[in-house]
């Protein structure tokens, strides 16, 4: 989870960093934090790094305000969660024009920061990643890109449209690391990504790459319900 802070006062920036790190340790969710002292500095860095999940944004900063920065961001990015953290309560209504998730008054309270991060992490607006070692290197792959995972002997293989990756881990360890309810153990040797299901029967799930993944008898009904609910909610 990649989190940016755009704040020109050190004491508020440092406070947010402290809260975010505490949230990460409590939830066991890996994070990266990037701090910026002005809207201009954020935009300069953003050209090379447009994959932030969350932005904690002050409003009154230098020559460009946080609201102006948010308006620029929204021209090309509707997914990043923007959370205003400021002393200026009169801007709260304007926050809706840039689809701000929340408006927090300084000094930000720990529980409010935690609540915002919980909400962001539980929605589909952030990109979740799975970290694993492959060929003596550590890789990260977006949950959205994983079609299914197959276990064979002591190894597991991640199947994606971009290639397959094999590493040593158990099915239980993988599910714990994914921490995503759209990944389901459908068989003793398979984890499927509900996002990539095309159809389902009593014995097989057909995936987006046309693979037929077997379903255990006691999981067929649950998989069918998850598939239905996921697609109904997306309509």
Image (spheres, rainbow, N blue to C red):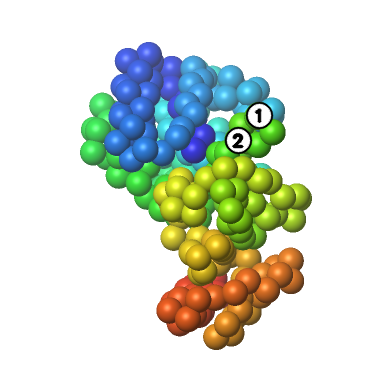
Q: Does dot 1 land on a helix, a strand or a loop?
A: loop
Q: Which mark is residue 124?
A: none
Q: Which mark is residue 136?
A: 1
Determine contact: label 2, label 1, CB under 8 Å. Answer: yes
**Nearest the eye: 111 or 223:** 223
Picture quadrant where residue 180 is located = bottom left
Q: Residue furthest bottom?
A: 202
Q: Does dot 2 land on a helix, a strand or a loop?
A: strand
**Nearest the eye: 234 or 216:** 216
- What residue appears at the point 30 percent right and 44 percent down from the top-left corner? 115
In the drawing, does residue 178 fall left or right of residue 164?
A: left
* Position in image of residue 51 (x %, y %): 61, 38
* Position in image of residue 1 (x %, y %): 49, 38
Is residue 63 in sight in this rendering?
yes
In the drawing, does residue 35 fall left or right of residue 157?
A: left
- What residue appears at the point 64 percent right and 51 percent down from the top-left corner? 157
Is residue 71 in sight in this rendering?
no
* Position in image of residue 144 (x %, y %): 61, 54
Label 2 packing within 10 angstroms: few (<14), some (14-19), many (20+): some
* Position in image of residue 217 (x %, y %): 47, 81
**Nearest the eye: 161 or 6:** 161
Which quadrant: the C terminus? Answer: bottom right
Label 1 packing within 10 angstroms: few (<14), some (14-19), many (20+): few
Q: Residue furthest top?
A: 10
Q: Which residue is mark 2?
A: 133
């Amino acid at each position: 989870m990649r989190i940016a802070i755009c704040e020109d006062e050190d004491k508020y920036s440092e406070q947010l960093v402290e809260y975010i790190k505490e949230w990460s340790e409590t939830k066991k969710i890996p994070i990266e934090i990037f701090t910026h002292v002005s809207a201009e500095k954020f935009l300069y860095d953003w050209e090379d790094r447009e994959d932030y999940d969350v932005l904690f944004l002050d409003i009154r900063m230098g020559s460009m305000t946080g609201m102006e920065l948010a308006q620029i961001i929204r021209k090309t990015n509707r997914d990043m969660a923007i959370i205003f953290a400021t002393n200026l309560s009169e801007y709260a209504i304007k926050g809706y024009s840039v689809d701000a998730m929340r408006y927090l008054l300084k000094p930000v309270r720990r529980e409010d920061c935690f609540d915002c991060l919980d909400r962001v992490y539980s929605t589909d607006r952030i990109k979740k990643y799975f970290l694993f070692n492959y060929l003596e290197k550590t890789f990260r792959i977006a949950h959205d890109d994983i079609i299914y995972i197959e276990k064979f002997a002591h190894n597991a293989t991640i199947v994606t449209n971009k290639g397959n990756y094999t590493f040593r881990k158990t099915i239980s360890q993988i599910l714990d690391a994914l921490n995503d309810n759209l990944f389901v153990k459908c068989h003793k040797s398979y984890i499927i990504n509900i996002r990539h299901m095309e159809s389902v029967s009593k014995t097989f799930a057909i995936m987006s790459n046309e693979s037929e993944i077997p379903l255990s008898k006691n999981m067929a009904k649950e998989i069918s319900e998850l598939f239905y609910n996921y697609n109904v909610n997306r309509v």
